[in-house]
Amino acid sequence: MGQSMRRGSGFSMVELVVGLAIIGALLAVGAPAVGAYLTNAKILATAQSFLSGVQQARAESIRRNTTAEIFLTDSVVISDPAVAQTATGKSWIVRAPDPNNAAVFIVVNGKTMSEGGGNKITVNGSVASVTFNGLGGTNLGAPATFAFGFDDKACGPDIRCINVVVTPGGRSQICPHITTGWAEQTKAHYERAVSRCGPRK
């Protein structure tokens, strides 16, 4: 009794080629979006890390009823409270006076940008440091802005750069960064967000 011939259950060469072509097209379309997502995640993580440092400096000044300072530096030696300060530094340090010797500073906390977003994260502060007093206020005469971005990618609707804003009264928060050339709808959305980050005491 003869048996009917059955076609194999595998894919033909044509089907494999078509499938690979579709996968390649999807990857080509999705790769830029994935890259932008990863970049934005790094920027946000670094900005949030700095924001936590600002908030820690304020809390430390209130707890100790004395001054506490957060500053940016290019030094990777974040255990040294006397390193040079710079408004574009890629590390931050929180320091406070030694309870036993007010002329000497001790490091409360510190981090390098590479711990969160990597060495390609950029920061541009309107000031290099912010000092908080025992009441939680600052030495600022106007709100300070610390802009976080990515060194080889321009800020825009895809690459969402972030500002950390610190007010003279000690309030701090994350705000979106607006650049020229955005589509009006996108720009209007972010401008509304920025308006909620307006200068406050």
Image: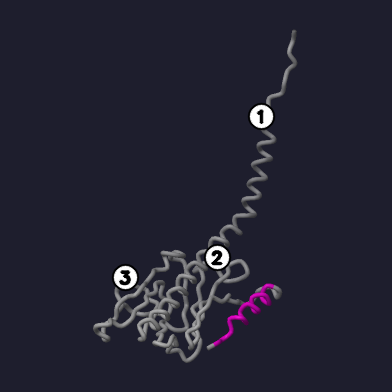
Pointer 1: what residue?
10
Residue 93 location, quadrant: bottom left
Marks 2 and 3, the one that precedes in the sequence: 2
Comparing 200 with 29, the one in front is 200
Residue type at tag 2: Asn
Q: Distance between the residues labelled 1 and 3?
A: 60 Å
Element under disc 2: helix
Residue 123 relative to residue 33: left or right:
left
Which tag, 1 or 2, sits closer to the chain's start?
1
Residue at 50% across, 64% down? 42
Decide: is 29 above or below 93. above
Label 2–label 3 contact, CB within 8 A: no
71 drawn magenta: no
Rendered image: mark on residue 77: 3
Residue 72 horizontal side relative to residue 201, left or right = left
Dominant secondary structure of the magenta stretch?
A: helix
Q: What residue sits 60% from the left and 71% below the top?
A: 156
Residue 197 place in picture, x, y as percent? 58, 81
Q: Where is residue 113 in the image (x, y as percent from the top left)?
A: 42, 68
Decide whether residue 191 is among the magenta residues.
Answer: yes
Q: In which quadrant of the rendered image does the N terminus lie?
A: top right
Instruction: Look at the image and give the residue range highlighted in magenta.
Output: 186-200
Could you say which disc has been placed on residue 94 in the image?
none
- Residue linked to disc 2: 40
Q: What element carries label 3?
A: loop
Spatial separation of the CA atoms under disc 2 and disc 3: 27 Å
Give, as a three-letter code, the residue at label 3.
Answer: Val
Which amino acid type corresponds to the residue marked 1 in the rendered image? Gly
In the displayed structure, 21 sits above or below 9; it is below
